[in-house]
Image: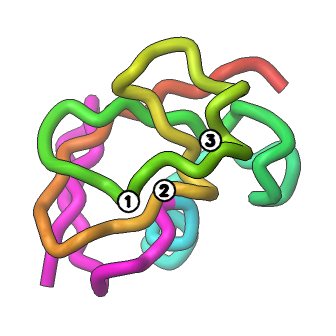
Amino acid sequence: MPSVEFRPDGRVLEAAPDSVILEICEDHDLPMEAACGGFAACNTCRVRVLAGELSPKDDVEVPFLDRPDQRLGCQARLTDSNVVLLLDPGDA
């Protein structure tokens, strides 16, 4: 089962492939802001991918990203690889 390490706190969580990052956080009581409720209408659940790969970017999330290594936690899904993410929230 792949794992997700969240920085800066270093917490490592395991989850099934195809799990949504926001849902992983919610399931493990790791605070992740989602002002829009997880519908890709804000950028408060942004993360930066420091290592590993997530699912391909969805066209709906691209307008909310400022950097090539950013993703929206409500849209990004785990693959079979381990990832390291930095919580990088934007403004609602």
Q: Residues within 10 Å of mark 1 (few under 14, many from 20)?
A: some
Say if 88 sits above or below 24 in the image. above
Q: Nearer the viewer, residue 71 or 9?
A: 71
**Residues at marks 3 and 2 touching, judged by CB atoms closer than 8 Å:** no
Amino acid at pointer 3: Cys
Mark with earlier residue (2, 1): 1
Amino acid at pointer 1: Ser
Q: CA distance from mark 1 to mark 3?
A: 16 Å
Numbered range of the magenta stretch: 1-21
Q: CA distance from mark 3 to mark 2?
A: 10 Å
Q: Nearer the viewer, mark 1 or mark 3?
A: 1
Mark with earlier residue (1, 3): 3
Which element is circle 1 on? loop
Residue at image coords 22%, 76%: 14
Q: Position of residue 1 (x, y in %)?
A: 13, 85
Q: Which residue is mark 1?
A: 55
Q: How many marks?
A: 3
**Mark drawn on residue 76:** 2
**Residues at marks 2 and 1 touching, judged by CB atoms closer than 8 Å:** yes
Q: Which residue is mark 3?
A: 45
